[in-house]
Amino acid sequence: MILYHGSTLEISHPDIAFSREKLDFGRGFYTTPIKQQAINWAMRFKRLGKSAVLNCYEFDETLLSQFHIKEFDVYSEQWLDFILANRTGQDVEHFDIVLGGVANDRVFNTIELLLENLISKQEALGRLIYEENNQQICFLKQEILDQHLVFKGSEKL
């Protein structure tokens, strides 16, 4: 499968050490199979006066069964609990790869309202059912990146 990563620079050798903590699926390297989604992410940097680069990778999806993965098909209570736990630094089950929906701006706003106790979990889930489930694939183990994610090139946007 072809995967994309929007950034400020070319990333031919992703390194989890450069990832921030307390992200949706934890500290890892985030990609998407949706090219436009990665372009949109990179363009956020450009609007801030930074460079915008679309990185392209190949990953053999038949290898997924070899790893400890977690997959969220839809925005659900389980997805929301996982996101909240990671964003608040709670200890969660450790996976090699996590696949699931992106907390885009509208989803992020809903999560922030929930974290601030301004809405209930049920209200948050009620809002999320109307959101398009964009896909992100987060690699949480450096060895997988080093051995199985093949850099195909980059494009300055």
Image: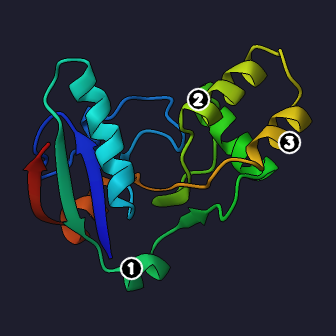
Give the number of the disc on residue 15. Answer: none
User: Is residue 47 rendered to the left or right of residue 26?
Assistant: left
Q: Secondary structure at mark 2?
A: helix
Dot 3 falls on a residue whose secondary structure is helix
Q: What x and y, as percent, mark residue 49?
A: 18, 18
Q: CA distance from mark 3 to mark 1?
A: 32 Å
Which residue matches tag 3?
126
Residue 61, percent from left and from top: 39, 79
| Image quadrant assignment for residue 139 | bottom left
- Residue named by callout 1: 61
The disc labelled 1 sits on which kind of residue?
A: Glu
> SS for tag 1?
helix
Question: Disc 2 vs disc 3: which is toward the camera?
Answer: 3
Which label's residue is closer to the chain start, 2 or 3?
2
- Residue at x-position 68% and y-position 33%: 84
Disc 3 residue type?
Gly
Q: Earlier in the sequence, mark 1 or mark 2?
A: 1
**Residues at discs 2 and 3 in contact (Cβ within 8 Å):** no
Mark 2 is surrounded, within 10 Å at the Cα level, by few (under 14), some (14 to 19) or many (20 or more) other residues, namely some
